[in-house]
Amino acid sequence: MPNRPARAVLPLLLSLISLPVAAVVETPGESVVTNITLKIEERDCTEAVEWLKYGLKQEYREVALMAGTMYDHGICVRRDWARAVGFYTQAHAAGMARGAERLAAGYADPANGPDVAAALWWASKTRSFRDPACRIAKEAVNDPDRFVAELSAWKPERLAYCNYTAGVIMTIASELRYPDMAAAYSMGGKLTLRFLPGVPRIELQKNDSQEFAMVGLINGNWKRDRDSKEIAGSIEKAVTQLGDRALKRYPQPQGIPADSVIELNYTFEVLYK
């Protein structure tokens, strides 16, 4: 009997599987993911799993990522990190960057070990993790034996620090999505996220805001509402909530300098086809 989705995990699931930072037209695989999501929202796990099986049979990479998410968090299926790894790896091999990000985040999670070597191996395959303190020699990046050998020479404090920062950053990178409210009102802009691991705290700086043209039938209320504080600040609010969740997921190691900082830059934009 598949697991029923608890109400508390639904917002998390939706944040994990929704559209990425740029809102785009759905692919066939994304359409199947949408159907799975709707069935989960309706608490219909039987149909959700049927759609999942269909999408996997079609070898849709988006559905492979979805399957990893469901097994990772026990949504409508029994939680199974080993199976999640297989699906995330499949998604990554098919070109889904979030597969590597979620593998790194999962392996760094104390609930799954943590496995520091695996976490840093997958983090090194992403564009988001560029902490100088965790840099791997170029010749070891794609060589598992050299990779493990290099990590074996690191001090435990360095390993703990890098597992922590990789976990937090990869959680944010893999779960960041275009907030529904901002997308609905075609709001966007550039955002700098500053992670202070020694505090720990995440700070946000909005570098600029942008209002994209709204298509379809638009009324005066929409134009007025788009300027409201709630909608104008919806991106910062969503990213702040994600950052708080990432910080709670991983225990902070001791001894990190308070002035340590890692910056990530994101652009939220609406793409039309």
Image (tube, rainbow, N blue to C red):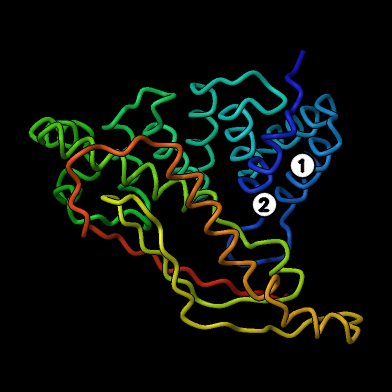
Q: Work out whether mark 2 precedes mark 1 in sequence or the reverse, and give the earlier one.
A: 2
Tell me residue 13's x, y (percent): 66, 40
Residue type for callout 2: Ser
Tell me residue 78's x, y (percent): 64, 18
Answer with the quarter of the image where residue 38 lies.
Answer: top right
Residue occupying the point 47% across, 68% down = 266
Q: Secondary structure at mark 1?
A: helix
Residue occupying the point 20% across, 46% down = 256
Residue occupying the point 36% across, 63% down = 194
Q: Quadrant of the C terminus?
A: bottom right
Answer with the quarter of the image where residue 140 lies.
Answer: top left
Q: Residues within 10 Å of mark 1 (few under 14, many from 20)?
A: many
Give the side of residue 262 with respect to residue 189, left or right.
left
Tell me residue 99's x, y (percent): 49, 43
Relative to 166, residue 226 above or below: below
Residue 18, numbered circle: 2
Q: CA distance from mark 2 to mark 1?
A: 9 Å
Relative to 52, residue 188 above or below: below
Residue occupying the point 88% across, 82% down = 221
Q: Quadrant of the N terminus?
A: top right
Q: Which residue is mark 1?
A: 37
Give the side of residue 154 with respect to residue 59, left or right.
left
Tell me residue 17's x, y (percent): 65, 46
Q: Residues within 10 Å of mark 2 (few under 14, many from 20)?
A: many
Residue nearest the viewer, comparing 60 with 100 = 100
Give the side of residue 65 with respect to residue 151, left or right.
right
Residue type for callout 1: Thr
Q: Secondary structure at mark 2?
A: loop
Q: Are marks 2 and 1 in contact (CB under 8 Å)?
A: yes
Residue nearest the viewer, comparing 119 with 24 = 119
Relative to 54, residue 244 above or below: below
